[in-house]
Image: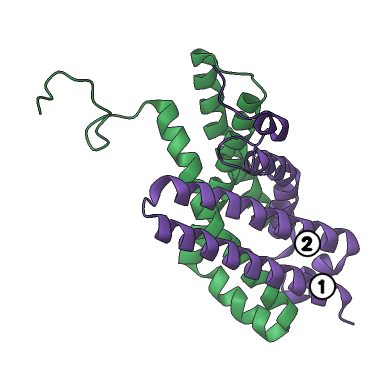
Chain colours: A green, B purple
Amino acid sequence: MQTDNRPISPHLQIYRLPFNAVLSISHRLTGIALSLGSVVVVAWLVAAAAGPRAYATAGVILGSIPIQVLMFLWTYALFYHLCNGVRHLFWDAGYGFDLAVTRRTGMAAVAAAGLLTVAAWLIAFTS
Amino acid sequence: MNYRMPIKDAKGLGSAHHGTGHWWLQRLTALALVPLMFWLVIGIAANTGAGYGVAVAWLAHPVNAVLMILLVATLFYHASLGLQVVLEDYVSHAGSRFAAIVAVKLVAIVLGTAGIFAVLIIALGD
């Protein structure tokens, strides 16, 4: 079959995704990451219910450097998914489809997620 | 020429046979999770560094216990709806797709129940 000059779909390993496409797939990826992170929330609740010894053990694991790094990334993923999710809700309501607006709200979501992440960790370190 | 039976329009459920329920609940739970997640992050950031006593006292407070139960239930419902869409998009084999979606829903139910039960123990245990 002759296939020259036909339009083809973007080859993901070559095609540079536009900004909004990167944000779009990031929404999905952060959603998957946060689903995994929710297991940690439940583990923490169960440890608290199980008593001081179990809670102390959980505290040692959750307080270790690799888990703390993961928690920081999860915090950013949470706030990114939240901010970008609000964009989606506005789109669902029929607002913000203009390309320039979409770009601006996208950058706002990325920036707001960063600020909220820093704010959350400032609260954690100062309390 | 319209080949659709009038009952199709009356039910309004479309080709997926369950209408817009999945889509709508994904949005509704998303909206509910916005304030709940702000509460959770601030609560965890402010109350978990000081050890068991402070964390349990915070969780045992009726307002926090109710919010935590609502959060766990909404979170796992939202997550299972989202993961279901991801699996529907990327798993092409019908049997594997079905099995994966059922597995995700079962895990979500188990984790959600465990989380809620833990909150109840903390809030109601002496």
In the image as oriented, which residue stretches furthest toward the bottom?
A53
At 67% across and 86% down in the image, what residue appears?
A: A53
Identify the residue at image location x=55%, y=17%.
A97
User: Foreground: A27 or B92?
Assistant: B92
Compared to B5, does A118 lie above or below?
below
The residue at which mark 1 appears reads as B120
Question: Of the residues shown, which amino acid type is indicated by label 2?
Answer: Ile
Is B106 drawn above or below residue B3 in the view shown?
below
At mark 2, the secondary structure is helix
Left or right of B49 in this view: A8: left
Q: Which of marks 2 and 1 is nearer the N terminus?
A: 2
CA–CA distance in space, label 2 to label 1: 8 Å
Q: In this view, does A34 lie above or below A109?
A: below
Residue B103 screen position, x and y as percent: 52, 65
Q: Can residue A127 be seen in this view?
A: no
Residue picked out by circle 2: B69
Q: Position of residue B114 (x, y in %)?
A: 69, 72
Q: Is mark 1 on a helix, strand or loop?
A: helix
Q: Quadrant location of the N terminus of chain B?
A: top right
The answer to whether marks 2 and 1 mark residues whose Cβ atoms lie closer than 8 Å is: yes
Do we see residue B90 in this rendering?
Answer: yes
Crowd around label 2: few <14 · some 14–19 · many ≥20 (10 Å): some
Mark 1, chain letter? Answer: B
Q: How many C-alpha atoms fall within 10 Å of the one at disc 1: few (<14), some, or many (≥20)? A: some
Label 2 marks which chain's residue? B
Q: Residue A34 carries which label?
A: none
Amino acid marked by disc 1 = Leu
Q: Where is residue A110 in the image (x, y as percent from the top left)?
A: 52, 34
Q: Which residue is located at x 68 percent, y 75 percent?
A: A46
